[in-house]
Amino acid sequence: MILSGWESVFFWVFGLAALVAGLLTVMARNAVHSALFLISALVSVAALFVLLGAEFIAGVQILVYVGGVMVLFLFVIMLVNVSAEEREEERLFNNSTQVTAAVVFCALLGFGLISVISRAAGPLAAPGGDPLMSAADRAAAGRQARAARDAALPAAETRVSRISEDTETVGASLFRYAALPFEIASVLLLVAIVGSVLLARTARQERAADDLDPGVPPEPARVGPGRSADVDAFSARATGAAEEV
Amino acid sequence: MMSLHGAAHALLLQQEVTGRVLSGIQHPDLSKFLVIGALLFAIGIAGVLVRRNIIVIFMSIELILNAANLNFIAFARYLQDAGGANAVAGQVFTVFIIVVAAAEAAIGLGIVIALYRNRETIFVDKIDLLKW
């Protein structure tokens, strides 16, 4: 999987766009801006998926993340009050010692991962190389192999610019080897739907759904035109509670 | 004589390094995708550790999961070209990760709404009922 020509241009454009948008997601003061930057990061990663020949996953990424999850995020941002953070009344980050420690830790993590990747890049790029060669020989062989490879690469004709048949293969593999996990995933989604509805309902909706609540006396049936004092007090308390939520 | 030899060696080495870097920029391979994924992962971890707004923390978690997805897809493509046994296994895994991420976002945002009703705040350092 070596990209060339316009594919490498698109790789750098979308890869750097994903990184910059990810950074801005973390740094943005307005939560809506954060969500929009995260959308651009996800779309850039979807473009990288297309470059890698995974068009189906790219489509799923756009549909599920951008179309579903991020819309949910935006709704929740509208439901909760984030304006104190925007008006700079609230600190954006944790206190400075925590931030310093976290940034140092993440920089170490990033550098460690990159150094491990670059150390593994040689064997990954040329599988089956002889590990017993001397360093100079290996460098020379690598140079020759790279030159030969670059000469052999046609400009942007590395199978990526065409739509591949991978989607069919992914579907067949999903249902052939992962049918049980697929069903479990559907049950998981059902549980998530029910759970999120259950978590997000208001106290009044809970009272309406549950059969009885020991804390709140049941609403007495209205028998006549007159209403007793305690019924009035109860309804006043109930409306107060409803306004509170 | 020795210094001349050393200078020539250094020049060769520099040419070698420059050529390798240029070739890597012109022809990105698996390791470049992995580097992008690692950096996205680190950015996401930083967001989780640094921010106070719980919604932005959830967004950072999505970023982390996406970095993992990028690694899966890159390795799937690498295996495909190397002739692996089940070369699209990485893509199948990615589908499941996306499903789990969607479920996690739904549950997490439900919790955020319930928390906001009860505590009137979305800042994680103010939600400290369990803190000793």
Image: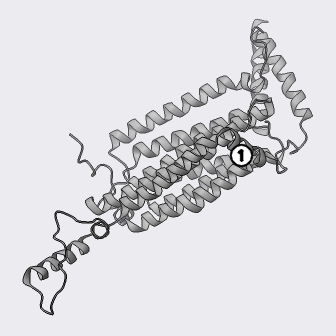
Whole-percent x, y for residue A40 in the image: 60, 57
Q: Amino acid at mark 1?
A: Trp
Which quarter of the figure has residue A155? top right
Q: Determine if residue B29 is in view.
A: no
Residue that appears at 83% across and 17% down: A140
Give the residue at mark 1.
Answer: A12
Tally of numbered discs = 1
Which quadrant holds the N terminus of chain B? top right
Which quadrant holds the C terminus of chain B? top left
SS class, disc 1: helix
| Residue furthest left as drawn | A229
Residue that appears at 29% across and 65% down: A210
Which quarter of the figure has residue B2? top right
Where is B33 relative to A27, above or below?
Answer: above
| Residue furthest bottom as drawn | A225
| Residue furthest front as drawn | A223
